[in-house]
Amino acid sequence: MLIEGQDLSVSIGGRRVLESETISCKPGMMTALVGPSGCGKTTLLHCLGLLLPVDQGRILIDGDDVTKYSTVARRHFWRDHAAFILQDYGIMDDESIAFNITMGVSLLGKRVTGNQARLVEVLEQTGLQGRENELASHLSGGEKQRLALARAIYKDASILFIDEPTASLDAANRKKVIELFSDFAMRGRTVIVATHDSEMINACGVRHEVGS
């Protein structure tokens, strides 16, 4: 899905955070939102993901103006098309890895439901095979990033919004996570990442300087 922001401006707490930002994020590519701390990278990411309203400008998805989407329409967009990997990972530590991916469980709470073949496939793709029954709390930071991506792959998200994914990762995990994001984009998905990591930026096909 093509996501475009046209002349986006946002103020938070009386301070202008974004001023007339225009950006185009194409499917099949990773777009990096870059710039110094406080420039509005995360704010722009949240606006494009319909998590934060804009004061001025328009947001288009495949040419349709979604700027004034209702709460119900935004929820449908998040459910049907979008996945988010934010700095807290969005992982439920006291639930199993399998549950965190499928978000489905039997009424008795003992057996994870969902497409089991697809679950096995995404676990293999993200290097978490054989660990579906472990609690997510057992995972390292890099493994939680991979778990969040596994959930996005499982739901077949069209758009992936990522905020500072490599900030606390060691070199090996950073490389693995970047490769997984690149592979996801190469499947025709739209990947938008707010980052200051030069290795992550170099892996992206498009670089957008926020606030420039």
Image (cartoon, rainbow, N blue to C red):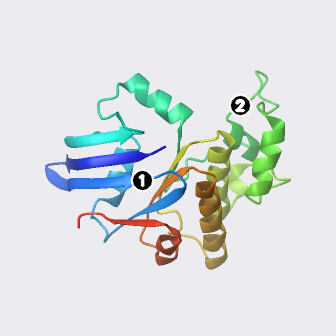
* Residue type marked 1: Cys
User: Which residue occupies 77% across, 25% down?
Assistant: 106
Q: What secondary structure is found at the residue carrying circle 2? A: loop
Q: What secondary structure is found at the residue carrying circle 1? A: strand
Q: Is residue 54 visible?
A: no
Q: Earlier in the sequence, mark 1 or mark 2?
A: 1
Question: CB of mark 1 within 8 Å of CB of mark 2?
Answer: no
User: Which residue occupies 42% across, 39% down?
Assistant: 62
* Residue at far front of view: 63
**Nearer the observer, disc 1 or disc 2?**
1
Rendering coords of residue 122 (x, y %)? 75, 49
* Label tally: 2
Rendering coords of residue 29 (x, y %)? 52, 58
Q: Is residue 65 above or below residue 212?
A: above
What residue sits right under mark 1 in the picture? 25
User: Which residue occupies 65% across, 45% down?
Assistant: 151
* Residue type marked 2: Gly
Q: Is 4 left, or right, of 167 in this rendering? A: left
From the viewer's side, name the closer residue of 47 and 140: 47
Q: Is residue 129 visible?
A: yes
Rendering coords of residue 170 (x, y %)? 61, 76
Rendering coords of residue 3 (x, y %)? 40, 46
Q: Which mark is residue 171?
A: none
Q: Is residue 124 above or below residue 3?
A: below
What residue sits right under mark 2 in the picture? 104
From the viewer's side, name the closer residue of 7 and 120: 7
From the viewer's side, name the closer residue of 51 and 118: 118
Circle 2 residues within 10 Å: few <14, some 14–19, many ≥20: some
Q: CA distance from mark 1 to mark 2?
A: 31 Å
